[in-house]
Image: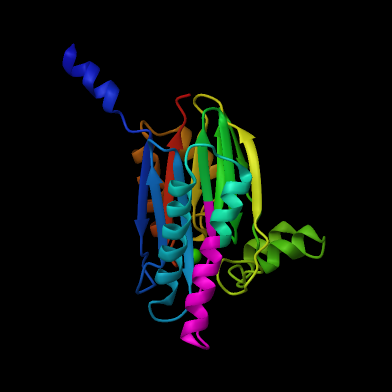
Amino acid sequence: MAFLTRIEVTKMAVGKRSEVGLIRKNNEDSYYIDEVGGIFVVADGMGGHENGKEASRLAVDVFVEHLRQAGQEMSLTNLRDGLNKANAAVFGEQTRLAGGIMGTTFSAAVIAGDRLFLAHIGDSRIYRIRESSILQLTSDHSYLAELVRLGELDEDALKNSTQKNVLIKAVGPEAVIDGQYLLETILPEDKLLLCTDGLYNLISDDELLAVINGSQSLQEAVDRLVELALLRGGSDNITVILYEHNG
Ligand code: CA
């Protein structure tokens, strides 16, 4: 029985996977997981050559370092400062490149007790799965999502568009950013799904929910989701983090 107990204790509360996909040469996504500190980040870089990867990596590193230095007390101001620092770093790097485009999406979830802090910019997503419902907590800062919000395009037209990846906001391209910062409550057994567009462009919200709730473990769910996206063409980098809150 002692053996079984140990399995219980070490049961992972996070599943994760990042894949280059079947078309792209490089994986420009970056991610960060600190289970103990309750910090989860996905970032989807853009730019030629190595720029996209450098942008997503740099943004994640600067943000995480800021949280580490800021100490125990979590707040939305703290997150905003971290994202602003990440933007300054990537913007500075882009300026140094003189002409090259360099940017990244950025979606972070930070958990402190039963509070869930989110910092977000771009079109990666954070979903909350609570029992049999899935809710996208972040807004897509993409050109087409903006048209849908303004009522100039319907959801079906959005699904079929080839311009899904045109961003109106990102970390890096401009000196000042206007991110989304949210404070939510997280309940025991809530799950958080963080992913880049390489996943959700190929898998609907209903399918995400069905796979997650139909899997035996978080890692199995992540693997099934990534493999489904690959089966459907894997046209982009795919990064997925799935966390279950144990309260
Ligand atoms: Ca992408």
What residue is shown at x 59% (from left), y 66% (from top)? 170
Colour mapping used in the image: rainbow
Q: Residue furthest bottom?
A: 99
**Residue at figure coordinates x 66%, y 53% from the top left:** 180
Viewer-closest of 3 and 154:
3
Q: Nearer the viewer, residue 2 or 160?
A: 2
Query: Where residue 42 sits: x, y (%)?
Result: 47, 54
Who is closer to the viewer here, 175 or 46?
175
Q: Is residue 201 left or right of residue 222?
A: right
Residue 72 vs 157, above or below: the answer is above
Image quadrant occupied by the N terminus: top left
Q: Using the rendered image of the protein, determine whether residue 55 is visible from the camera's viewpoint.
A: yes
Relative to residue 130, is residue 3 depicted above or below? above
**Per the image, is 99 magenta?**
yes
Q: Which residues are magenta?
A: 85-107
Q: Residue furthest right?
A: 151
* Magenta segment includes 106: yes
Q: Position of residue 46 (x, y in %)?
A: 49, 72
Q: Is residue 201 visible?
A: no
In the rendered image, the residue lying farthest to the top is 1
Q: Considering only vertical position in the picture, is 176 above or below 60? A: below
Q: Where does the image place residue 123, in percent across and percent down from the top left?
A: 59, 60
Residue 82, quarter of picture: bottom right
Residue drawn at x 50%, y 79% is: 94
Q: How many marks?
A: 0
